[in-house]
Amino acid sequence: MILVRMASRSGDRDDLLAAGLGRQPAREQTAPQVSEDAILVGAARDGDRAAFGRLYDRYARMVHGVLLAKVPLSEVDDLVQDVFMMALRRLSSLRATGSFGAWLATIARNLANDYYRRSVPEDPLADDSSESDIERGDTGRDHEGPAATILDAVRSLPDAYRETLILRLVEGMTGPEIAARTGMTHGSVRVNLHRGMQQLRAKLSPGSNGPEQETP
């Protein structure tokens, strides 16, 4: 099962463009070595914009997928840029330079949570969206067709399965690549993909009577 890749919008932040961080076409990459990340982070801290650009190229798909699991598609590309701008400003605070991916994923998740805190109206009665819609980032139809149906089903799954499946099905990342980029263990990625696919098939199956119960 393959979902169509979502096209990015033009108009990236000027200062990111100056750093050579415009969104690049996705391409398959092998899992990065921790030492290489550490070298690039060290160089970026010293003002090497090309080094930070390489980190962007390496991690943009991961950040895009983490955000897509939580916020509306129409907001994802702008938030990707925000995540990297925030990371660039906070790079000096990163102690474990070899854990850049896990650190970046945390920034993305926090920014997604902040997005909803900013979006909640002061008067709860004025909000027409259900709580479940908000949780899965479904505040409106971002796109139409079979891919939209599958994406909506994925975004209704528990957080861990949702994020891992989107990285696999939408962003096209392999299991080992997901582990390398996010800092998750290979075992956790395998479990999330396996259980997530089971629940996704149950939701999409015409004969399903409802969501499959999550395995403890």
Image (cartoon, rainbow, N blue to C red):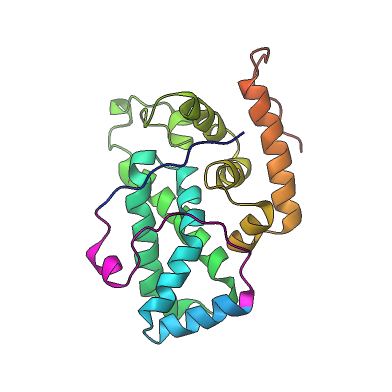
The image quadrant of residue 95 is bottom right
Q: Is residue 24 above or below residue 93?
A: above
Q: Is residue 20 above or below residue 128?
A: below
Residue depicted at x 73% and y 48%: 190
Q: Main secondary structure of the magenta part?
A: loop
Residue depicted at x 59% and y 34%: 157
User: In front: 31, or 124?
Assistant: 31
The image quadrant of residue 126 is top left
Residue 62, x across and y down, in percent: 51, 55
Image quarter (top left, top right, bottom left or bottom right) of the C terminus: top right
Residue depicted at x 61% and y 22%: 204
Q: Is residue 33 left or right of residue 133?
A: right
* Residue 96 appears anywhere in the view: no
Residue 47, x across and y down, in percent: 36, 84
Q: Is residue 92 above or below residue 120?
A: below
Q: How many marks do you count on the picture?
A: 0
Query: Is residue 24 shown in magenta?
Result: yes
Residue depicted at x 46% and y 42%: 5
Query: Is residue 44 shown in magenta?
Result: no
Q: Residue furthest bottom?
A: 46
Residue 26, x across and y down, in percent: 47, 54
Q: Is residue 149 left or right of residue 195?
A: left
Image quarter (top left, top right, bottom left or bottom right) of the N terminus: top right
Q: In this picture, which residue range is highlighted in magenta? A: 11-34
* Residue 19 appears anywhere in the view: yes
Q: Is residue 162 left or right of residue 94?
A: right
Residue 61, x across and y down, in percent: 49, 54
